[in-house]
Image: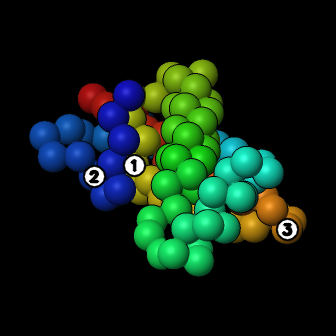
Amino acid sequence: MLLATSDVIAGKDIINTLGLVRGNSVQSRNIGRDMIAGLRNIVGGEMKEYAEMLVRSREIATQAMIEEAQQMGADAIVGVRYATSSVMDGTSEVLVYGTAVRFK
């Protein structure tokens, strides 16, 4: 499955727009991760534990979007965008969306 942030893919002719596809993932923090991140907050440095959590959340959301597009018979997803938000204290949501298309 091709994914593109652009609305077109070079060398490909889109013949059918199938519609919006999306995926999301909500992750919560845990006490161990919070304690380590709290220490890093005091001494400085990258909060790798949270970065890894968001990377995993992006992967889960992207895979859900791809599966939805595959069910529609898509060849690619164009106009892919990511958004994040806090659902409640201690949680983070990653949302990904785009347009499923079929090529000539």
Residue at the farthest left position: 11
The residues tagged by marks 2 and 1 sit, at their Cα atoms, a distance apart of: 7 Å
Q: Which of disc 3 and disc 1 is earlier in sequence? A: 1
Q: Look at discs 2 and 3 and give the one toward the viewer.
A: 3
Residue found 46% across the figure and 29% down from its top = 74
Q: Are marks 2 and 1 in contact (CB under 8 Å)?
A: yes
Q: Which mark is residue 28?
A: none
Q: Which residue is mark 2?
A: 8
Mark 1 neighbour density, 10 Å: few (under 14) some (14–19) many (20 or more): many
User: Label 3 amino acid?
Assistant: Asp
- Residue type for callout 2: Val
The answer to whether residue 50 is seen in the rendering is yes
Vertical placement of 47 versus 62: above or below? below
Q: Left or right? Give the position of 29 relative to 52.
A: right
Q: Which mark is residue 89?
A: 3
Seen at 55% across and 41% down, the residue is 56
Element type at mark 3: loop
Q: Nearer the viewer, residue 79 or 27?
A: 27
Q: Is residue 95 visible?
A: no
Quadrant of the image occupied by residue 90: bottom right
Q: Mark 1, mark 3: which one is toward the viewer?
A: 3
Q: Which residue is mark 1?
A: 78
Q: Relative to 32, does residue 68 appear above or below in the rendering?
A: above
Label 2, secondary structure: give it. loop
Q: CA distance from mark 2 to mark 3?
A: 38 Å
Which quarter shows the C terminus?
Answer: top left
Q: Which residue is pictured at 53% across the width and 23% down the height?
A: 70
State how far apart marks 1 and 3 are (Cα): 33 Å
Residue 79: where, in percent of width, then height?
Answer: 42, 56
Residue 10 falls left or right of residue 43: left
How packed mark 2 is, by other alpha carbons closer than 10 Å (few <14, some 14-19, many 20 or more), is some
Task: Indicate the position of residue 35 as horizontal and vertical percent values.
Answer: 71, 58
